[in-house]
Image (cartoon, rainbow, N blue to C red):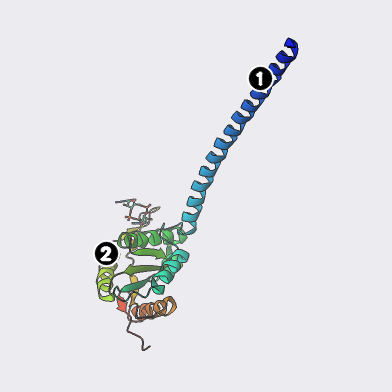
Amino acid sequence: VDMSALQKLVESLSEATTTVLDHHAALENRLSESSREVNRLRKHLDQVRMEAMTDALTNLANRKSFDEALDTHCESDDVSSPLSLAVIDIDHFKRFNDTWGHQTGDQVLRYVASVLARIGRPPRMAARYGGEEFGLLFPGETSAQVERLLNEARQEIASRVLKRRSTNEDLGTVTISVGVAQRQYGEDSFDLLDRADKALYQSKNNGRNRVTVASLSSM
Ligand code: C2E
C-alpha cells in the first residue's frame, strides 16, 4: 500500500467534507435570514392591507371596504335575514369648517366617528363614506330597529357641547341627519344606497337633526 497516496486521499476527502459542511452552514444561515424577511414582509403587508381599508382621520373603515362589504351582503340571496343600511351626514359641516377652521372640523368628524364606531361593532360596520358622510351596515336588523338605534345616537351626539381645544371657546352642538333603508328582495347595493340617500335628503329637507326611513320602491 502506498501510504503517502492514502494519506493524500484522506486529506482531500476531509477537506471536501469541511467545504460541504461550511457550505451547508452558510445555506442554513441564508435560509433563516430569508424566512425572517418573509415574516417581516408578511406583517408589513397585513399592515398596508389594513391601512388601505381604513380612514386615517377617524379610524373607521373607508369607502372602499364599506362598498365591498355592502356588495357582498347584497349578493346574498338569503331572505330569512334582513339587511339595513344607514347613511349619515353632519349638519352644516361646511359652515362649521368655515367658522372654526379645518383642524376643528377634523375634531368634529372624529367626535361623530367615535359615537358611530361604538354602534358599528361587528357584525355591523361603520365607515367614513366621504367628507362628512358616514355609512353603517346592519346585517340581520330591520329598518325599524336601526331607526330606533340611530335616533339614540343622534340624541347622544347632539347632547354634548364641544369646546375648541386651542381657545376653549364653545363650538355649540353637532347634529346629524340620517337616512335608513332596509334591503328589499333582490335589491342590489346601488338601489339600496340610492333609497337610503333619498331618505337622508328628506331628513335634510325636513329640518335636519332627524332620522328618515326610506319607503319601499315599486319593483
Ligand atoms: P381625541 O382628542 O383623540 O380624544 C380621545 C378620547 O380621549 C376622547 O374620546 C375622550 O374620551 C378623551 N379626551 C380627550 N381630551 C379630553 C378632554 O379634554 N376632556 C375629556 N373629558 N376627555 C378627553 P371622545 O370623547 O369619544 O372623543 C373622540 C374625539 O372627538 C376626540 O379625539 C376629539 O377629536 C373629538 N372631540 C370630542 N369632544 C371634543 C371637544 O369638546 N372638542 C374638540 N375640539 N374635539 C372633541
Rendered image quadrant of residue 4:
top right
Q: What residue sits 34% from the left and 60% below the top?
A: 117
Q: Does the residue at mark 1 contact the one at mark 2 (Cβ under 8 Å)?
A: no
Whether residue 95 is visible: no
Front residue of 12/136: it is: 12
Q: Amino acid at mark 1?
A: Ser
Mark identifier at residue 156: 2
Rendered image quadrant of residue 133:
bottom left
- Tell me which numbered mark, 1 or 2, is placed earlier along the sequence: 1
Q: Is residue 122 above or below residue 84?
A: above
Quarter of the displayed picture in which ligand 1 can be seen: bottom left
Q: Horizontal placement of 3 versus 63: left or right?
A: right
Q: Amino acid at mark 2?
A: Glu
Secondary element at tag 2: helix
Q: Is residue 145 above or below residue 112?
A: below
Q: Which residue is mark 1?
A: 14
Front residue of 16/109: it is: 16
Q: Horizontal placement of 147 versus 205: left or right?
A: left
Secondary element at tag 1: helix
